[in-house]
Amino acid sequence: MRATEAPSNRVRATETHGRTRKKRFATIVLTVALAGAASVPASAYLKLGTRIGTRTVTLKWSQMPIRYYVTDRGTTGVTSTQLQQAVSRSFSSWEAVPSAITSSEFAGFTLANPSPGDGATVIGFQNRPELDRTLGATSFMVDTTTGAILEADIFFNSAFPWSVAAQGEANTFDLESIALHEIGHLHGLAHSALGETELRSGGRRVIAAEAVMFPIAYATGNISGRTLKADDIAGIGDIYPAASFTRDTGSISGKVTKGGKGVLGAHVVAFDMRTKTLVGGFSLSDDGSFVIAGLDPGPHIVRVEPLDDGDVESFFDLTLDIDINFRPQFYDKIVVVPRGGGTSGVELKVVAK
Amino acid sequence: MRLSRAVLFLALAWGACPNVATAQIYIGRSVPHAGTVEVSGGGTFSGGYDLGSISADETRNTGTGSGPFVLFTATSRTKPALGLQGRLGVFVAQSASLEAGIQLARPILSSLLSGDAESAPDVTATETLTRLVVDGSLVLHLSGLSFAGGKGVPFVLGGGGYIRELHEKNEVIETGREYHAGAGLHLWFGQGKHRLGLRTDVGVSVRNGGADFSETKHTIPTAGISLAYLF
Amino acid sequence: MRRLIIVITLLSCTHQLRATVLLPAEFREIVAGSQIIVYGRVAEVRPEWSDDRSRIDTIVSVEVSSYLKGGPGGTVTFRVPGGQIGRYRNVMVGAPSFEAGEEAVLFLSASGPSVAHVFGLSQGVFRVHVDERTGRRLVIPPVLMAQGDEPQAVTRGDRSRRQLSLDAFAATVRAAMAQQPGAAR
C-alpha cells in the first residue's frame, strides 16, 4: 500500500534505459515561517506554502540541484525529446537569474507518469480530461511529520494541443511558456496578479500580463511567456537569494487600510520609475501588512487594487476573509527604495466601492 | 560764525563727493589684479523642468491590440527651487577671474499619475530631492561698462559643473552634468583693496542627468544674489 | 538532518498552494458545463488513493440545501485532486480544498458512473461566507459574465462587481440557465 511503503522504493521501478541508479534521498529541509514581526523582507509576491499542524510552511528546495525525470512519452506535435529540451530551457531561464541561486539536473527519461507517490520528481504529458481547462499543474508530496518535500511533479495536459515551434504555432499552446510557469511553481513560487483580462464568448482571456507567473495562459501561438519579467525575478530571488539579492535590492513595506482597519488580500504593485518595471505583492495579514522585496534601488510609484476579477482562488484560500470591496488607488508619495534596505511605513488608505 | 563754518565745510564736502564718486574706484593697487580673491555667499533660484512621461506597461496578448498595455502613466516634473550658494573666485587678470561654486537646493519632484486602466483616481505623488551642484566658471568683469563711479561692475560668465541629486532619505544618488552661461552685476559698497559688495546674476543652465526619467537635456533659468567680499 | 533554517518573517508571507495554468471560463460556460449545481454544507472530507493508485484524491460529501441544476439526492459527492493519507500529503497546486462545515455553491461535472469533479479544477467553487455585519450569506468570488458579443475588459475595482448575496447568486445562475439553448421557458 503506497501509504506505508517508503517512497524511495518506488523510484527504482521508474528507471529506464537499463540504468539502475540508487536514488539517494537528499534531506530536503524547509524554511519555516514563524509568526511575529518581520526582521527581513518577505516575498516579492506569494510563495507557496502548506499547513503542517498549526504552522504554514514555505515550500523550498534547500538542496540543489533539483533532480528531475522526464516522462518518455510525447504528444501530438511534441516528442519526448522536444519535451525534455523545452523543460531544460525553462529550468535554465530560472537559473540564469543573477540574484538567485538555483540549479537543476536532468536525471533521465522515465516511463512513469508525473504523479506523486513514486518518490521521483517527474515532468511529462498526461491525459487528464477531467481537469478541463487546466493546461498544466504542479503537485507536491510532503511528509507532514518532517515538513520535507518528497517529490514534486508537473503534468502538461495532453488533452490540449501543444507546440515547441520557435516562433509559436497557431492553435497550439506554447509548451516552453507553460513549462516556465510550472517550473516556477516547482521552485516554490505562487501566482502573480500582474495581468489584465477580458470577458468574451468562449471564456476569459488575457489582455496583457507582466509576469510569467500570472495564472492565465496567453493565447495559442503566443510565445511571450518564455521570458521572465521583473516580478518573476524578484520572486525567485526572494526564495533563493544570491548575495547580490540582499546587497543590491531593497523593499517597500507598509499597510493597506480601509476605514482604519487592515485589508487582507489587496494586490500592491510597485512601479520602478527608472527601469519602468512592475513588481507586485499582497497584504497577507489581517492588519493589512504587505512587503514587496527584490526591488531595484530608486524611486517607485505604489498602487493598490482589489482581486475582484474572479481569480481570488488562484491566490488565496477562500476560507480567509479576503476584502475585495475597494477601489484601486495610488500612494501619494514617490517611494524611494534604498540599496540593501527597505522603506517602511507606506500606508495605502483605500475607500469602499 | 560756527554755523557759517559748518555750512562751508559741508559745501566743500559736497563739492568734493561728486569728484570722488566720479573718480575710478579702482585706485592704484586697489584694482583687482591677478591673485585677488573674491568670496561670496547667498541665495539661488533654479527653474523647474519637465521630466517627461513614462508608462507602466504590461506585455500584450496576441489579438488584443497593438503595442503594450498601459496600466497607468506618470508625468513628472522638477519644480522650481530656492537654495543656497557659495563661490570662491581668484582673479587671473584685472578683468578675468576663475571661480568655483557650490549650490544646494531641495526641489520637489512631482509625478502626476493618470490614465489608470482601472480608473484609479489621478494623484500627484511627490518626493523632495536634495540637489548639490559643484561648478566652475570663467568670469569676465566688464570694467569698461562700470558705472556709479566704478561701484557697479557688470560681468559675464560661463562654465560647467557636476550635479548630484539625492532622493529622499539620501539613500539613492543620481548624477549629471550642467553647463551654464549668464551675466551679472557687482555693486561694491566700499573702495580700496578690501571691499564688501552685492553680487547678482541671471543665466541659463543646460542640464543632463540627475533624477531624470526623460534622458534629455533641460534648459532652465537660474538667478542668484549674494554678499561678496573682495580681498 | 540538516539544521533547520529559520527565517523570521511574516507568518502569512507564505500561503496555501494555489497555482496552476488555467483557461478560465465565462460564468455561463461554467453553468452550461456543469451537470450539477448545488448549494450545501461540506459534511465529510475523505482522502483516498486514486483508482490507478498514482495519487491521493479527496472525496468530498456535501449535505444539500438546494439544487440549482440536477438533483441526485440529499447528499452529493465529488472528487478533488490532493489529500493526505497517513503522514503523506499530496497537494495539486490550484486544486480547491475543503473543510467540514464550509458552505459553498458547487458546479460539478460528471460523466457516467464516475464520481463528479469540480468544473475547471477550482472554477466551479463559489464559497459562501456569512457577513458579520449584516448576517447575510455572501458568495465569493464575484460572477464574471459577458454582456453581449464584444469583448469586455475585466477591470479591478469595478463598482458594479460586488459579492452577491446567496439569493442573488442563485437568481444569476437561473438566469444563465434560462439563456442556454433548449432551456425550458
Image (cartoon, coloured by chain):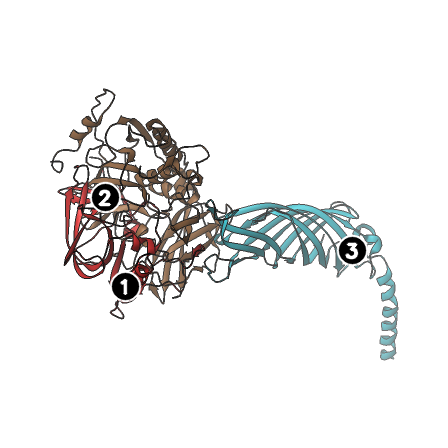
- Label 1, secondary structure: give it: helix
Figure quadrant of residue B196? bottom right
Q: How many residues crowd mark 3 within 10 Å: few (<14), some (14–19), many (20+)?
A: many
Q: Residues within 10 Å of mark 1 (few under 14, many from 20)?
A: many
Tell me the residue at 79%/52% (across/down).
B30
Q: Nearer the viewer, residue B169 or A271?
A: A271
Mark 1 and mark 2: Cα distance apart in space:
31 Å
Mark 1 vs mark 3, CA separation in Å: 85 Å
Q: Label 2 vs label 3: CA separation?
A: 82 Å
What hue represents chain C?
Answer: red
Which of the numbered marks, if any, corresponds to residue C170? 1
In this rendering, position of residue A312 left or right of residue C83: right
Q: Callout 3, which amino acid? A: Pro
As drawn, the label of residue B154 is: 3
Badge 3 marks a residue whose secondary structure is strand
Specify the subunit that label 3 lies on: B
Mark 2 is surrounded, within 10 Å at the Cα level, by few (under 14), some (14 to 19) or many (20 or more) other residues, namely many
Q: Residue at x 21, y 30 (%)?
A: A25
Q: Color of chain A here?
A: brown
Quarter of the figure that contains the C terminus of chain A: bottom left
Q: Which residue is mark 2?
A: C91
Which of discs 1 and 3 lies nearer the camera? The answer is: 1
Position of A113 with respect to B121 (left or right) is left
In front of the other: B124 or A307: A307
Of the 4 image quadrants, the one containing the N terminus of chain A is top left
Element at label 2: strand
Whether marks 2 and 3 lie on the same chain: no
Quarter of the rendering containing residue A243: top left
Chain whose colour in the figure is cyan: B
Question: Picture coordinates of residue B173 (x, y %)?
Answer: 52, 47
